[in-house]
Amino acid sequence: MTANRGHVTASQINGPGVHSLDSFSFHVPDIAQAEAFHRAFGLVTRERGNALELLTDGAPHVWCRVTEWSRKSLSYLSFGIFEEDLDRFKRHLSECHIALVDAPPGLETNGLWFRDFEGTLVELKVAGKSSPDQKSHGMLISSDPGVAGSPKRSQAGLVRPARMSHILLFTSDVDRAVAFYTRVLGLGLSDRAGSNIAFLHGRHGSDHHMVAFVRSTAPGIHHTSWDVPSIHEVGLGAMVMADRGFTDGWGVGRHVLGSNYFHYVRDPWGSYAEYSCDMDYIPKDAGWTAEDHDDDDAFYVWGPKPPADFGVNHEA
């Protein structure tokens, strides 16, 4: 049974709040393998120093930096803040007894760096708002009577995500993750399923979740999610990736929490990249009520059965 317990909305949070998950970084054992996977997925890749940058087609924003290390692991999260909130965040971090630390070596930044309760490196930096200011409506492109609506398979083209939607992270303690990221970063709780998973949004308007946490034994990346305009692109992306050898995954389906259509493609390291369409949107100062849902009733509305190891943290 669904219950309203322990919810934290953005409008109830004192102090400043981040407006976007501006970027993130992770390590992989093989940069060339990362480039091949993400280019097939439809992202733009660019070498910059010792890192591989991930962008979306036709946009200058760098969503991710991939660097090479002995194993797959999350490096840091970088959240965007408004310039007028910079001094407020400095005071807020001090009041929360959060110690500032140095940025990763070789990274040029003027941001505020610190670690969350599990040691994950977090940055707050002044940046333009990269989270959406309105809902990204999923499109249904139909055709007139007497006109074929579908392209030939050979002419279907590639899928080009428009932007990053969110990231789902493993954590050893979902409750502590919610408490930290709402109290320190000013995110709002959107929905949760007990202490198993929780979804957080930005108080300045964002998708239903820009970051989410799922229970495991240690930190890690479960999946990154990328917004596409229609369920056609969700399905086409699944086919394009399968044609390129990336056949493992889950979908096509529709989630309950967030309401988005999805298809997950397993990457070479056991985590996933998700094509996502038509996610719920929580406007600035909206009266959204966060609910606590039963696990079995809150995962997906329809779709194939997920893989048996879908929730396994291969970084643990």
Image (cartoon, helix red, strand yellow):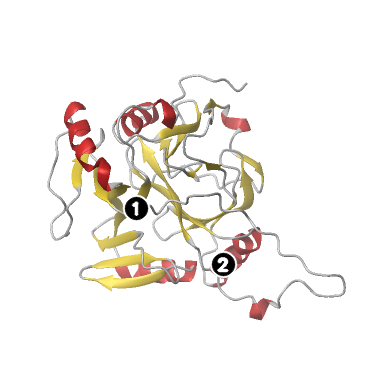
User: Label 2 amino acid?
Assistant: Ala
**Can you say which quadrant of the picture contains the N terminus?**
top right
Say whether residue 230 is left or right of residue 18. right
> In the rendered image, which quarter is residue 179 located in?
top left
Q: Residues within 10 Å of mark 1 (few under 14, many from 20)?
A: many
Q: Which residue is located at x 19 percent, y 27 percent?
A: 95
Who's the residue at 15% across and 51% down the image? 103
For the C terminus, give its image quadrant: top left
Q: Amino acid at mark 1?
A: Asp
Pick the residue in front: 4 or 293: 4
Residues at marks 1 and 2, CA–CA distance in whole angstroms:
29 Å
Left or right relative to 8: residue 144: right
Q: Pick whichever of labels 1 and 2 is earlier in the sequence.
A: 1
Q: Secondary structure at mark 2?
A: helix
Residue 204 x, y percent position in the rendering: 42, 41
User: Whole-percent x and y of residue 112?
Assistant: 19, 45
Q: Residue furthest right?
A: 146
Residue farthest to the bottom, as pictured: 154
Judge the density around disc 2: few (<14), some (14-19), many (≥20) Cα neighbours within 10 Å: some
Q: Nearer the viewer, residue 143 or 87?
A: 87
Question: In the rendering, at what x and y percent does residue 271 appear?
Answer: 43, 52
User: What is the number of the mark on residue 242?
Assistant: 2
